[in-house]
Amino acid sequence: MSQFVRFTIDGTECMASKGQFIVEAAKENGIYIPTLCNYPGIKPKGGCRICTVRVNGKLMTACTTPVAEGMNIENDVKDIRELRKSIVELLLVEGNHFCPACEKSGNCELQALAYRFQIMVPRFPFQFPIRKVDASNPKIIKDQNRCIQCKRCIRAIKDEKGRSIFAYRKRSSSVEVVVDKKLGKQLTDELAQKAMDVCPVGSILVKEKGFIIPIGERKYDKKPIGSDIENMSVSKI
Amino acid sequence: MSKPIIATTSLAGCFGCHMSVLDIDDRILELFELVEFNKSPINDIKKFTKKCDIGLIEGGCCNSENVHVLKDFREHCKILVSVGECAIMGGLPAMRNGIPIRECLEEAYLNGLTVVGNEERIIPNDPELPMLLDRVFPCHEVVKIDYFLPGCPPRADLIWDALVALISGDEMKLPYEVVKFD
């Protein structure tokens, strides 16, 4: 039998199963904590730091920290909002994110977070890095200009033997996520689509599927990211 | 009180943002009641004839003329607004930023698939022509910009709300649907 723990998020009393990660626990209580590298169903990484919350006075990533009894969590407060916003701004200038020319625009989580934080212009200078587009795979395009190295594809897209189709190459600031040449050839249509859906930005695209949803009907055209969680009726345990 | 004066220009842009200004539809009549236009492609005034209150900038800086015009706007306008993605981050013209300038020119005038004529293989270099910059610059990396209106183009309602807010001094409403990057 699972145990329940009580904790507070921004003063609101919450309840969740013991051992649940803060992001999930908050979601069950109708509270949205922004995430980017996190994806339901795959092991959390704690890489992007967008989900940073203050737990009993210490900054922690909500996607990798399990809830515990009596935790006092600060989420939607000014300095943390500011920190999250600056991470989004840094990501926007670090790569080449040309939203008007991107097939993922309107369905992109990075863009949706920028909308949510009302970013009109990043405060940092645009880097315009020189990156490549790999269109050699028969099913998908891997655009390094837009990759934010969240590793969601590496963690989620596996072949039938459990091997990752995507992998890290190089190190440090030149690190990039690439398609495994051999395993990539076996990509099925379903897996290719899953890879595109798992990618939070427009770095993985299924060929011949661009701009399939008209403007106005895309995921984040009308409702901000996280509004589905906030509008969820609070589950009473 | 005299009417606020507006100037507009299109630098390295496609005039889409100006078209979006026209998309305010019949409110344009109201706009002409509220403000006076100075240098702008809308009324075809080529040179500043007086100091302006608001300058709307479309497009980033891709050549020496863009930089010159932008600096002229900064000098003549109290408030400068970057309108649209190109002004804010270079936009589509900035997609050439990773390509050496020589390669760009050779593609456009010598080797491109759509190049016809040009048997003498000339890359235009008349001194009258503005010099291309090594890369496209967002406007706020060249002069101080006061406000930013994202979008490709910014929605007409966003432009209208921004102008009304600037003229009236009221805080701007920013409904979720109008602030978009595409």
Image: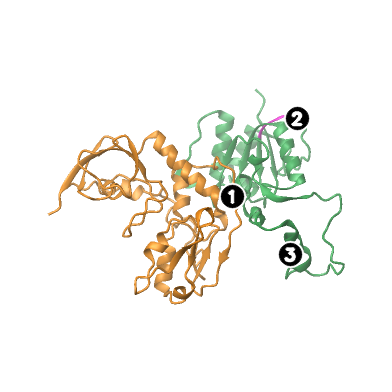
Chain colours: A orange, B green
CB atoms at circles 2 and 3 under 8 Å apart? no
Q: Residue furthest bottom?
A: A186
- For the point 39% across and 38% down, the residue is A80
Q: Amino acid at mark 1?
A: Pro
Disc number for residue B50: 2
The x, y position of residue A168, in whole percent, is: 46, 62
Q: Are marks 3 and 1 in contact (CB under 8 Å)?
A: no
Pinpoint the chain carrying mark 1: B
Q: Is residue A198 visible?
A: no
For mark 2, give the secondary structure: loop
For residue B91, side relative to residue B111 (left or right)? left
Label 3 marks a residue whose chain is: B
The picture places residue A219, in percent across and down from the top left corner, at 42, 56
The extreme front residue here reads A171
Which disc number belongs to residue B153?
1
Could you tell me how far apart the alpha carbons at marks 2 and 1 are, in whole angstroms?
Answer: 28 Å
Q: Earlier in the sequence, mark 3 or mark 1?
A: 3
Instruction: Quadrant for residue B55, please give it.
Output: top right
In magenta, the rendered stretch is B50-54
Marks 2/1 same chain? yes
Q: Amino acid at mark 3?
A: Glu
Q: Say above or below: A168 vs B77.
A: below
Closer to the eye: label 2 or 3: 3
- Label 3 packing within 10 angstroms: few (<14), some (14-19), many (20+): some
Give the amino acid type for the residue marked by disc 2 in the picture.
Lys
